[in-house]
Amino acid sequence: MSETGLSEFEKAVALIKKNIENNILDDKEIKWMLSLVTNYAHSWIMLQKYDEGTLSLENMKIMKTNKLEYKDALKAIDEMKKELLPKWEVSEMFWVEKNDGLKWVLDQVYLTFDWQELYPSIQEKAAALIYFIIKNHPFADGNKKIWAFLLLVFLAQNNYLYRANWSKRIDDDTLIALTLLVATSESWERDMILKLVASFLSD
């Protein structure tokens, strides 16, 4: 890893350290956060290449995606609530939307500028979905559960939930760790976090 790559890697580790020191995390949460370190070297090399303009996008699925429509997202979440509510795993306030918050999130995921999508790949759209739901809290309750569920819905409808060998594109521990990382990140770290999450979803 180059000096620049090492510097970025150190920033990632420092961010995790900050999260552990400034939050009341149990042992499992600390394990989830630290488990990301083993993947950071690859991710930060990718980010360094991105910054230098040398990142290859050949593994990014830059193609027309099946759009996660607002009405379909609400229907999926409603079905999730019907299943979880009798088990007392969610509250009555689960998925009660605040001020069309989910619609705003989905608009951000598919945002265009000059007829070009800001998040052109499947991975970048998934990262944006994760980030904007967690940071903007579009629901009265259950935002983290909902983003994880909608992420799976989005990946499944684009045939990107599993790799060619049928292994999960993203495992449960990494999913939880990324949730913690996004939730505790600062607003000025947004681009860095979006790139990081997208890199975890690439092959």
Image (cartoon, rainbow, N blue to C red):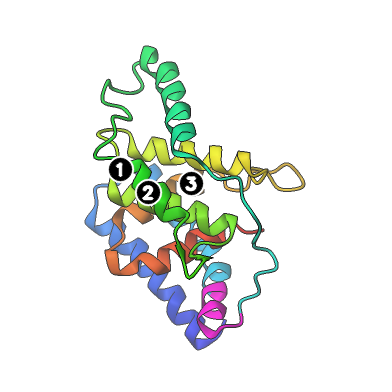
Q: Is residue 119 left or right of residue 165?
A: left
Which residue reaches farthest top?
86
- In percent of the image, x 42 and y 47: which residue is there? 106
- In percent of the image, x 68 and y 43: which residue is there? 159
Local SS, label 1: helix
Dot 1 or dot 3: first in sequence order is 1
In which quarter of the view is residue 189 placed? bottom left
Task: Note whether 110 is above or below 73 in the view shown.
Answer: below
Which corner quadrant holds the C terminus?
bottom right
Please give the range of residues in magenta.
45-54
Label placed on residue 105: 2
Nearer mark to the viewer, of 1 and 3: 1
Nearer mark to the viewer, of 3 and 2: 2
Q: Is residue 52 magenta?
A: yes
Residue 31 visible at all: no
Label placed on residue 101: 1
Amino acid type, label 3 = Leu
Amino acid type, label 1 = Gly
Mark 2–mark 1 Cα distance, whole angstroms, equals 6 Å
Crowding near pointer 1: few (<14 within 10 Å), some, many (20+)?
A: some
Mark 3–mark 2 Cα distance, whole angstroms, equals 19 Å
Residue 68 visible at all: yes
- In percent of the image, x 69 and y 43: which residue is there? 167
